[in-house]
Amino acid sequence: MNQIVRDFKAGKQERARFWINLGGRLVYICYYAVRDAAGGYLGTLEVTQDLTEVRSLTGERRLLSYDGDAQD
């Protein structure tokens, strides 16, 4: 992680992505450089997502199709 932050600070990278198998689940981890309007480094955002269910999707679901019955 330290190398990722160094590369973000130096402007060498904007994103670092990884995926691992963890307890039978496919986990996707993505780090993003957060910058101010001038491009200065402010920090790092980490996003972690379980892709196990996503990998099993087939066909398509169109916009405005929701799970369950409740709609706003």
Image (cartoon, rainbow, N blue to C red):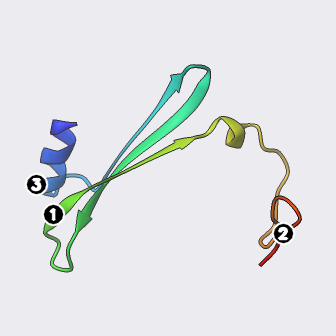
Classify 30 as above or below 44.
Answer: above
Indicate which disc, 3 or 2, sits on the residue closer to the N terminus.
3
**Residue on which the image places disc 1:** 41
Specify the quadrant that holds the N terminus: top left
Question: Is residue 47 shown left or right of residue 31?
Answer: right
**Residue on which the image places disc 2:** 70
Indicate which disc, 3 or 1, sits on the residue closer to the N terminus.
3
From the viewer's side, name the closer residue of 4 and 50. 50
Eye-nearest disc, 1 or 2:
2
- Under mark 3, the amino acid is Ala
Looking at the image, the residue that sits furthest to the top is 23
- Under mark 1, the amino acid is Tyr
Eye-nearest disc, 3 or 1:
1
Indicate which disc, 1 or 2, sits on the residue closer to the N terminus.
1
Q: Residue at x 22, y 68 (%)?
A: 35
Q: Are marks 3 and 1 in contact (CB under 8 Å)?
A: no
- SS state under label 1: strand
Question: Is residue 12 shown left or right of residue 49?
Answer: left
Identify the mark at residue 10; answer none if there is no mark: 3
- SS state under label 3: helix
